[in-house]
Image (cartoon, grey):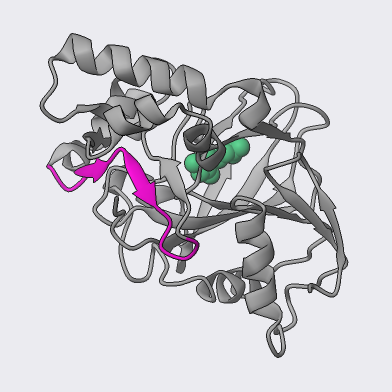
């Protein structure tokens, strides 16, 4: 058991944890307990009231696995948003200082699973709120394990064995996601495209999840484009049913840790002209997704 106050956020998805200080090393089995709580919450934990400097954020994240910025790099267009001198810290912000963006603005304002277009996508993403607007800038999460579990056996059988192409170009091409100056040609050279199973099995829990997302999934392997679109449109509508969602309203000091293997997420960019938002994200690298 975690030595902290633990509150469920919805019946299936998400736990709020109050009373931990993640700048201190977790002794004994505490990290194993923490990870179990995370898995039991379908991969979403909100740790409140943290005071994380970059090093303690990175050190805590490293307990989940290897990190983007250290053992692999994101697509090139994101590199300018990495913390100078500390590339494991990716800055998400609408702030601009002396003409230079202080982070990626409008990051993830579409349903997606981080970096799903790579052979090794994101495992945990750990997003830490340093400044938030007075209102707005919430983040939505969709439980892809619950979405899978609630399909009929007939539909599960249809999907069994299917594969999908994930491609960074899908997000880059959709309007309102990336402006031209945020894209670099090398993002399209093939390293940011990969085929994954449509149904994946979580390597740590054995739970099955749907692993397709509107942000990066280009199509189903072997299907005509119209066939693929019909199936993917259904899966996207199904997996974003209200009962599979949690909407996070941020407070300064929140560290939100989500599992990209079992969730999609969507940033709500409704705070333009309302206030400044500044966050640090540390991202753990996953094993190759398996059926
Ligand atoms: C991300 C992301 C959501 C947000 O950092 O991966 O999608 O609300 N951000 O900023
Ligand atoms: Mn994201």
Seen from the viewer's position, the closer of residues 207 and 187 is 207
* Residue 290, percent from left and from top: 29, 54
Instruction: Left or right? Give the position of 18 relative to 85.
Output: right
Is residue 184 visible in this depiction of the protein? yes
* Residue 207, percent from left and from top: 48, 53
* Residue 31, percent from left and from top: 65, 77
Image: 55 above or below 104 = below
Q: Quarter holding the N terminus?
A: bottom right
Q: Which residue is located at x 23 percent, y 34 percent?
A: 164
Seen from the viewer's position, the closer of residues 61 and 104 is 61
* Residue 248, percent from left and from top: 72, 37
- In which image quadrant can residue 9 be found? top right
Q: Which residue is located at x 75 percent, y 23 percent?
A: 274
Outermost front residue: 153
Instruction: Left or right? Give the position of 145 relative to 5.
Output: left
Residue numbers of the magenta segment: 190-205
Seen from the viewer's position, the closer of residues 15 and 279 is 15
Seen from the viewer's position, the closer of residues 275 and 176 is 176
Q: Which residue is located at x 20 percent, y 9 percent?
A: 226
* Residue 6 within the magenta-colored segment of the rendering: no
Instruction: Left or right? Give the position of 84 relative to 255.
Output: left
Image: 277 above or below 224 = below
Q: Which residue is located at x 59 percent, y 53 percent?
A: 43
Image: 233 above or below 196 = above
Is residue 215 visible in this depiction of the protein? no
Q: How many marks?
A: 0
* Residue 204 within the magenta-colored segment of the rendering: yes
Instruction: Left or right? Give the position of 228 relative to 60.
Output: left
């Amino acid at each position: 058991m975690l030595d902290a106050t633990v509150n469920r956020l919805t019946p299936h998805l998400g736990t709020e944890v109050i009373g931990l200080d993640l700048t201190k090393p977790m002794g004994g089995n505490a990290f194993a307990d923490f990870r179990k709580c995370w898995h039991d919450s379908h991969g979403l934990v909100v740790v409140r009231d943290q005071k994380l400097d970059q090093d303690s954020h990175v050190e805590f994240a490293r307990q989940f696995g290897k990190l983007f910025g250290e053992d692999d790099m994101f697509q090139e267009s994101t590199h300018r948003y990495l913390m100078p001198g500390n590339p494991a810290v990716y800055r998400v912000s609408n702030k601009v200082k002396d003409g230079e963006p202080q982070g990626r603005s409008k990051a993830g304002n579409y349903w997606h699973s981080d970096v799903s277009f790579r052979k090794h996508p994101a495992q945990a993403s750990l997003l830490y709120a340093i400044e938030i607007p007075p209102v707005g800038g919430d983040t939505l999460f969709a439980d892809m394990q619950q979405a899978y579990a609630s399909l009929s056996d007939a539909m599960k059988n249809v999907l069994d064995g299917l594969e999908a192409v994930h491609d960074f170009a899908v997000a880059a091409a959709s309007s309102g996601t990336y402006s031209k100056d945020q894209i670099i040609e090398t993002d399209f050279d093939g390293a940011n495209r990969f085929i994954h199973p449509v149904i994946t099995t979580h390597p740590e829990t054995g739970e099955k999840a749907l692993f397709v997302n509107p942000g990066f999934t280009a199509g189903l392997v072997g299907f005509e484009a119209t066939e693929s679109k019909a199936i993917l449109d259904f899966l996207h509508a199904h997996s974003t049913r209200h009962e599979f969602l949690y909407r996070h309203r941020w407070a300064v000091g929140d560290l939100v840790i989500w599992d990209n293997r079992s969730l999609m997420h969507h940033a709500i960019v409704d705070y333009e002209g309302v206030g400044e938002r500044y966050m640090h994200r540390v991202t753990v690298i996953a094993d190759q997704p398996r059926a």
